[in-house]
Image (cartoon, grey):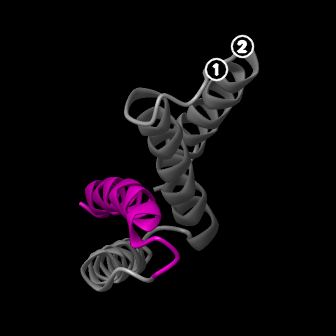
Amino acid sequence: MNWLILGLAGLVEIAWSQSIKPTQNFTKPLATLICFVLMVIAVYLLSYAMRTLPVGTAYAIFTGIGAVGAIGLGVIVQRDPLSAGRVLALSLIIGGIVLARVTNPE
């Protein structure tokens, strides 16, 4: 169950990462509130998952999911450039997430 919670925490982190830019340097009150609420939810879910998961593994997977999602949404929504190097970097991050999960002793 904590693996699912960790996955959910990663998805919320993706939403949080996308909510930062609309705050316009935290000058937009509603956008800033949404940003902070998403941040708190993401960290709460991460800490909940860490009750039984190793801290290093959980945090690495959490940030990996966030990084892949943020880059993916950046490419799709923001039209960020996608190069061979970025695809390779994403592949390595995804491979690391999978490896961390399958080699976990739990």
Name the residue furthest top: 84
Q: Answer whether residue 105 is visible to the viewer in this image.
A: no
Apparent side of residue 48 relative to residue 82 in the rendered image (left or right):
left
Asked if residue 6 is among those painted magenta in the image, a careful observer would answer: yes
Q: Residue 89, relative to residue 4: is it above or below?
A: above
Q: Secondary structure at mark 2?
A: helix
Identity of the residue drawn at 64% across and 20% down? 87
Q: Residue 58, relative to residue 102: is it above or below?
A: below
Badge 1 vs badge 2, beta-carbon distance below 8 Å = yes
- Total count of labels: 2
Apparent side of residue 8 relative to residue 77 in the rendered image (left or right):
left
Identity of the residue drawn at 31% across and 73% down? 38
Image location (x, y in percent) of residue 1: 23, 60
Question: Where is mark 1, residue-wise?
Answer: 87
The residues bearing labels 1 and 2 have C-alpha atoms spaced at a distance of 5 Å
Task: In the rendered structure, find residue 84 and report the number of the disc placed on it.
Answer: 2
